[in-house]
Image (spheres, rainbow, N blue to C red):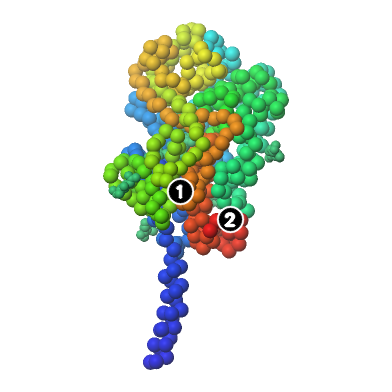
Amino acid sequence: MVARVVAALFVLLFWLPIITPSSPSLSVCIVGSGIGGSSVAHFLREYSSPSASVSIRVFERRGVVGGRMARVAVGGESFEAGGAILHPKNYYALNYTKLIGLKIRWPNATSASDGREDDGDFGIWDGKSFVFKTWRVNSKLPFVDKIVPLANKALLFWRYGFSLIRMDNFVQRTVNNFLKYYESTNSRPVFETVDDMLKWAGLYNLTGNTLEEELISLGLSPLLIRELITVITRINYGQGVSISGLAGAVSLAGSGGDLWSVEGGNWQMAAGLINRSNVTLHLHEAIESISNLGNYYELNSSQGNSYKCEVAVVAIPLDEVDICFDPPVSIPPRKLQHTHATFVRGLLNPAYFGLRYVEEIPELVSTIEDPGVPFLSISVLKRHDEKEATYKVFSREAMADALLDQIFSVRKETSRIDWGAYPYYKAPEVFAPFILDGRHLYYVNAFENAASTMETSAVAAENVARLILSRHFGDVPLKLSASESSPANTGLHLEL
Ligand SMILES: Cc1cc2nc3c(=O)[nH]c(=O)nc-3n(C[C@H](O)[C@H](O)[C@H](O)COP(=O)(O)OP(=O)(O)OC[C@H]3O[C@@H](n4cnc5c(N)ncnc54)[C@H](O)[C@@H]3O)c2cc1C
Ligand SMILES: *[C@@H]1O[C@H](CO)[C@@H](O)[C@H](O)[C@H]1NC(C)=O
Ligand SMILES: *[C@@H]1O[C@H](CO)[C@@H](O)[C@H](O)[C@H]1NC(C)=O
Ligand SMILES: *[C@@H]1O[C@H](CO)[C@@H](O)[C@H](O)[C@H]1NC(C)=O
Ligand SMILES: *[C@@H]1O[C@H](CO)[C@@H](O)[C@H](O)[C@H]1NC(C)=O
Ligand SMILES: *[C@@H]1O[C@H](CO)[C@@H](O)[C@H](O)[C@H]1NC(C)=O
Ligand SMILES: *[C@@H]1O[C@H](CO)[C@@H](O)[C@H](O)[C@H]1NC(C)=O
């Protein structure tokens, strides 16, 4: 009997101190439910040990999650309105779709229910004429189908020459450097600043020069820079070749082959990550203030609610929102580039382009920098029949009805979105830190002036999640892959 009591006491004494203090807890409030905020939630779950009790709240001012991954309804059908295309090496996005069970939509698929039809032809419009145009042949012969892309490659080569190969090498090199961010957490440090993160992957220097400077130093022809490259940066970032070399390389990578999107909408990645991360989601609730009250942050919302969290994560661009920080935070000024996306169901007017037949207008009308060109690009999202298609027009200014009436001969439905789309890029870029106050207030979108894409948001979010856990818990509950559980933290930059 006595032995039993002693044994029981022994067990109690022995286990109690282990059980109580070793059940660490953490409360995190995330502002924004785009790919950035939802990825932070996902990686917090992925990396925190099961013994840690981590509670996560996500705040979204709108009624849906996904942010700039949003759909627009035109003529009863839905299309990507913001972030549309993903690169075949966007590994986090690829993993998300697998994890959540979403379907990938390759542009080569036959059922083009949304997104852009990639096999279409394209032309470069200078305001007066098409300075370049690829061939389109509507043929049922597989032989011709194979020849046309080859002929178009030859056409491109004819106009731009070996500079195309130099451009390709530049993009490949940059993409390969970026792949370092998928290395094992064993060898990949946690970064406290965007500068450190970019330097580690060999990408920082590219933010110091403009794309134009970078490409000239690589010996690319001025014609290629003025035309094809400008066309691409205008489509992807609404800006010309004065953007940084890094934003430019990312933009060029997003114009290659094998680009994909999520069937039914990219926003489902955010929805799926939030759904499976045991998150308390607050829709229709904008955060208006974040105050540091010592051991926690107090977040006040548009609903008049007040939330307390040990860690606060800002997963929105701070450039155009006025969240009131107490104490105030100071970050380098940054402007957003606005892209007006205008969706039209109708038919383009060939006369506007100096053509006789609408079939002669390329599927993608791209443009060079010229004050006389009132839009960035016009692309066919879907052809309904010979008399009707759904188009997406990108422009820097809102498209007035009078202008649309010149460009379109038929306009049955028009829908407009003014996006605070991405940073206005310049060189050299100056970055805000990931840690806004030196304590536990984090900023995912500090990475956005390196480049703004769905994948870069996820990559920045992964780093922020590791930063949160390593700084909050020290080396305790970081759960990395089983084989690397103990020595894993040697690579972490810990600040205790
Ligand atoms: C027209 C356009 C085309 C693009 N094309 C591509 C592309 O083809 N490929 C690609 O990879 N990327 C593309 N991008 C960029 C890509 O969409 C973004 O980089 C990415 O989606 C940003 O995600 P995020 O989570 O960082 O921010 P966001 O998606 O902006 O998420 C922020 C969220 O926070 C919410 N919010 C804001 N303020 C508050 C507040 N105070 N309280 C609570 N919630 C708040 C917002 O409503 C939003 O839902 C494009 C962007 C645009 C606009
Ligand atoms: C979800 O998180 C809450 C804390 O936010 C926790 O109490 C609950 O046990 C978690 N549920 C699951 C299924 O993990
Ligand atoms: C489309 O391309 C992808 C990637 O190259 C490939 O895996 C897929 O099989 C292709 N699908 C079709 C229908 O050709
Ligand atoms: C994607 O998922 C696979 C399998 O779960 C994993 O091995 C791989 O490391 C993941 N890739 C990234 C970039 O996280
Ligand atoms: C970046 O520039 C610095 C200074 O000019 C140079 O020392 C360094 O080698 C460059 N890094 C890379 C990766 O090119
Ligand atoms: C959320 O996840 C569960 C499985 O974990 C699934 O059954 C459900 O359909 C998901 N809900 C949404 C809205 O994705
Ligand atoms: C936030 O709300 C609380 C409770 O209503 C209030 O005491 C506090 O002053 C508010 N903070 C700010 C910055 O408005």
Task: Tell me the quadrant of the picture where the N terminus can be found.
Answer: bottom left
Identify the residue at horizontal 58%, vertical 22% (top origin).
230
Nearer the observer, 401 or 345: 401
Residue 131: % across, % down: 59, 13
Q: Is residue 216 above or below residue 446?
A: above
Q: Is residue 302 above or below residue 407?
A: below
Nearer the observer, 413 or 58: 58
Whether residue 151 is visible here, answered yes or no, is no
Q: Dot 1 lies on which element?
A: strand
Circle 2 packing at 10 Å, graded few (<14), some (14-19), many (20+), is many
Is the CB of mark 2 within 8 Å of ligand 4? no
CB of mark 2 within 8 Å of CB of mark 1?
A: no
370 horizontally vs 385: left or right: right
Residue 397: image quadrant is top left
Residue 404: % across, % down: 40, 14
Q: Is residue 53 above or below residue 190?
A: below
Nearer the observer, 44 or 338: 338
Identify the residue at horizontal 65%, vertical 41% (top origin).
202
Identify the residue at horizontal 65%, vertical 36% (top origin).
205
Q: Is residue 385 above or below residue 179?
A: above
Q: Which residue is mark 1?
A: 441
Q: Dot 2 lies on which element?
A: loop
Disc 2 vs disc 1: which is toward the camera?
A: 1
Residue 419: % across, % down: 42, 29
- N-terminal of the pair, mark 2 or mark 1, is 1
461 horizontally vs 167: left or right: left
Q: Residue furthest left?
A: 304
Q: Label 2 is placed on what type of residue?
A: Leu
Q: Which residue is mark 2?
A: 492
Residue 263: % across, % down: 44, 37
